[in-house]
Image: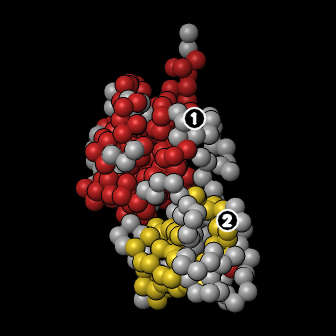
Amino acid sequence: MMRPSPALDDESLIAALRLASGRDPVPGHVSAAARAAFALRLPGAVTARPVPAAAPAGVRAAEPDRLLRFGAGTLTVDLEVGSSDGLVDLAGQVSPWPGAGSWIEVRTPCLTESRELSPAGQFAVTGLPPGWFSVVCHHRGHPPVATSWTRIRP
Amino acid sequence: MTPEAQVLDQRTIDAVLVGDQAAWDVLVRRFEPLIWAAVRAYGLGPADTADAVQGAWLRLVENLHTIRDPGRIRAWLFTTARREASLLCRRNRGERLVADPVEPAGAGEHTPADPALAVLTADEGHRLWQAVETMHEPCRSLLRLMAAAPDAGVHQLAGRLGMPTGSYGPTRGRCLDRLRSMITVQETAP
């Protein structure tokens, strides 16, 4: 839930003054990223929303805020976030196992990595660029389930 | 921004909903100055600023199918962008948020529009600047400089205003308070 804010906070006033003065144009790369975001739409997908994460069996993490959990219906996606050399590593578990032939995609605005799920429903992707990502679970006969966009900067 | 630019026409929205990239580009061009200004006001670094802006767009893409009232896209984007920027500020202040686990409101939900949106129009921006021009120093120069040099650091801004670095933040706060009360008085005047 959003916290209630004063009717007109400092940030709104600053934004209004700067917007009206027209002295701070949107940089080209920011604009290009906004246009490119449309290619990441996934019609028909079900969004898995964040739910409080508990350490799932078999996933270890030194810091509890590096564990993320997303849920949609009965499907749960648990993620452990790691990093090396400034890049992001994700180890995940889809439960219950969606069945044979199911696979996941880890999507970022600049690249997508696909992995088959292990029979235990696990997957791992390493070396992702820091920033926004979403994990999409594809399983036969069902619409894809996509975790809501989440930002990671190690 | 002209008043009519605050709402996209239904044809553009319909085209966006069926996957028309050109229509999306129209939507981006229409609203990106607002989103950019909203996020920039939080004073984040370049990477965080770009992340917060992109986060707002990604969330709109994610929630497109829930849109029932296209007239609310502007308000939804504004609120979402401010929320992303605010979360990054909190994280940078030391709150431990590797990722953002908070659920955004659905695009179709009838949450009340942020009252701040009312000042983010061309007419209101003009009125704000008229009020600034009637302010005493250092407020008039400070607010002009703040708008004209959005990338300047506190040290640089304070130097140009001839005040100690530590005074810039509190002075800016007082100037914004005064501006806020001025436009509020204008609103309530008969």
Q: Which of marks 2 and 1 is in front?
A: 2
Q: Which chain carries label 2?
A: A
| Label disc, if present, on residue B98 of the rendered structure | none
Residue at image location 33% in from the left, 58% down from the top:
A36
Q: Quadrant of the N terminus of chain B?
A: top left
Residue at the far top in the pictured view: B190
Name the residue beneath numbered marker 2.
A71
| Residue A150 percent across, percent down from the top left | 53, 66
Residue A24 placement, left or right of B100: left
| Residue B54 percent across, percent down from the top left | 41, 58
Residue A100 placement, left or right of B148: right
The answer to whether A12 is drawn above or below residue A122 in the figure is above
The answer to whether A84 is drawn above or below residue B125 in the figure is below
Q: Mark 1 lies on which chain?
A: B
Dot 2 alpha-carbon crowd within 10 angstroms: few under 14, some 14 to 19, many 20 or more: many
Residue at image location 51% in from the left, 20% down from the top:
B186
Name the residue beneath numbered marker 1.
B113
Say whether marks 2 and 1 touch (CB < 8 Å).
no
| Residue A154 percent across, percent down from the top left | 50, 79
Say what secondary structure mark 1 lies in.
loop
Residue at image location 33% in from the left, 46% down from the top:
B20
The type of residue carrying mark 1 is Ala
What colouring method underlies this structural image? Answer: secondary structure
B53, A47: nearer the viewer: A47
| Residue B100 percent across, percent down from the top left | 59, 65
Q: What is the spatial separation of the Cα atoms under label 2 and label 1, in whole angstroms? A: 28 Å
A34, B126: nearer the viewer: A34
Q: Can residue B164 be seen in this view?
A: no
The type of residue carrying mark 2 is Gly
Q: Quadrant of residue B31?
A: top left
Q: Quadrant of the C terminus of chain B?
A: top right
